[in-house]
Image (spheres, rainbow, N blue to C red):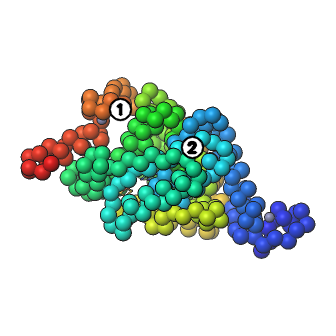
């Protein structure tokens, strides 16, 4: 297959990727150009951030967030990487993830802020989940990551945090919320969450790009990334929704993009009234971050496990 753009210019260049839902075959250079343009268009369309703002990029070590960090930096934005090291020992997962983030930080010559859970709190994420009596480590992990990314952004004066969520992630969440008619969540699902007192803005510049496109970008740009996902993620239900959407996409190219884009345009506004507003936020009595209770959920979990360990004589 030949690159469509080169062909239009009378050149014969072999395509490296075929983007089925856009019916677009592109060579390496034209694909990279297309990919960067799509991302910048999304940033502009949703007014995610401006030049001159300092952008925190939450990097896990995976293809999405590392690609995003490189792309934003090369596009001339002032970026800072934020990595939460969770202490997952299986397959040396956390150690390897941190190394990959550090490697890119050096390559891009941009700072990386690392928050090590074990060093700062005394426990790894698996210990926190176990001691607090929660079976689903990834869900506790999600609570801690969201809390810490926000806390670090506020403390470091970063007005915005960008994450690597892609079209496959966003359409799977949308399908899951639609199947269960979680109207509160549907009213809130959006590529930008505005800043409020105590909360930095959250943005998803890759929300219209697929996993396949991002992995191609990462490989073509020579980015080293974690090829395996979190070893605790086996219980997560999102792969089921991803598989369902992959099947539909295979039968009808463009389903994922249409499903998500049309939702943002036509359905999300209808549910906005039902969005689960966090009323009456007050500073957490322990850490000072905004919460609806006296003590925020992260401090509550930490207090609980420290209490358990104090009683059993540990720590
Ligand atoms: P996930 O929920 O693992 O699919 O990750 C979604 C996004 O959250 C990633 O693309 C990153 O931007 C961010 N993220 C996930 N894990 C971490 C981590 N350990 N440290 C910093 N950011 C992370
Ligand atoms: Fe963090 Fe699974 S334990 S995502
Ligand atoms: Zn070309
Ligand atoms: Zn707190």
Circle 1 Cα neighbour tier, 10 Å, few/some/many (<14 / 14–19 / ≥20):
many
Q: Residue 83 versus residue 12: which sits nearer the camera?
A: 83
Q: Secondary structure at mark 1?
A: loop
Check disc 1 and report the residue beneath it: 289
Residue 5 in percent (x, y) is at: 82, 62
Q: Is residue 59 visible?
A: yes
* For residue 20, above or below residue 152: below
Residue located at (18% from left, 44% from top): 306
Residue located at (91% from left, 66% from top): 10
Check disc 2 and report the residue beneath it: 79
Q: Secondary structure at mark 2?
A: strand
Residue located at (59% from left, 43% from top): 264
- Give the mark nearest the N terminus, 1 or 2: 2
In the rendered image, which quarter is residue 28 located in? bottom right
Q: Residue 255 versus residue 82: which sits nearer the camera?
A: 82
* For residue 219, above or below residue 66: below
Residue 82 in percent (x, y) is at: 46, 47
Looking at the rendered structure, the number of numbered marks drawn on it comes to 2
């Amino acid at each position: 297959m030949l690159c469509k753009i080169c062909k239009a210019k009378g050149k014969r260049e072999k395509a490296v990727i075929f983007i089925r839902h856009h019916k677009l075959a592109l060579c390496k250079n034209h694909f990279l150009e297309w990919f960067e343009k799509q991302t910048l268009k999304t940033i502009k369309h949703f007014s995610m951030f401006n030049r001159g703002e300092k952008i925190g990029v939450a990097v896990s070590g995976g293809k999405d967030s590392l690609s995003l960090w490189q792309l934003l930096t090369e596009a001339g934005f002032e970026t800072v990487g934020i990595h939460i090291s969770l202490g997952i020992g299986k397959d040396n997962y956390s150690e390897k993830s941190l190394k990959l983030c550090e490697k890119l930080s050096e390559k891009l010559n941009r700072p990386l802020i690392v928050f090590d859970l074990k060093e700062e709190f005394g426990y790894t994420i698996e210990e926190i989940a176990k001691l607090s009596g929660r079976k689903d480590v990834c869900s506790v992990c999600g609570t801690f990551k969201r809390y810490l990314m926000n806390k670090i952004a506020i403390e470091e004066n970063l007005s915005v945090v960008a994450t690597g969520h892609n079209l496959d992630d966003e359409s799977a969440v949308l399908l899951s919320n639609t199947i269960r008619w979680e109207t509160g969540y549907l009213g809130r699902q959006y590529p930008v969450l505005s800043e409020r007192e105590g909360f930095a803005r959250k943005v998803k510049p890759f929300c219209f790009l697929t996993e396949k496109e991002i992995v191609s970008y990462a490989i073509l740009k020579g980015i080293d990334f974690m090829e395996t996902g979190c070893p605790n993620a086996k219980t997560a239900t999102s792969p089921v929704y991803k598989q369902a959407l992959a099947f539909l996409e295979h039968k009808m190219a463009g389903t994922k993009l249409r499903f998500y884009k049309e939702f943002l345009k036509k359905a999300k506004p209808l549910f906005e009234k039902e969005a689960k507003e966090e009323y009456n936020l007050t500073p957490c009595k322990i850490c000072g971050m905004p919460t609806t209770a006296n003590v925020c959920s992260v401090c509550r979990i930490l207090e609980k496990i420290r209490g358990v360990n104090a009683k059993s004589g540990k720590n």
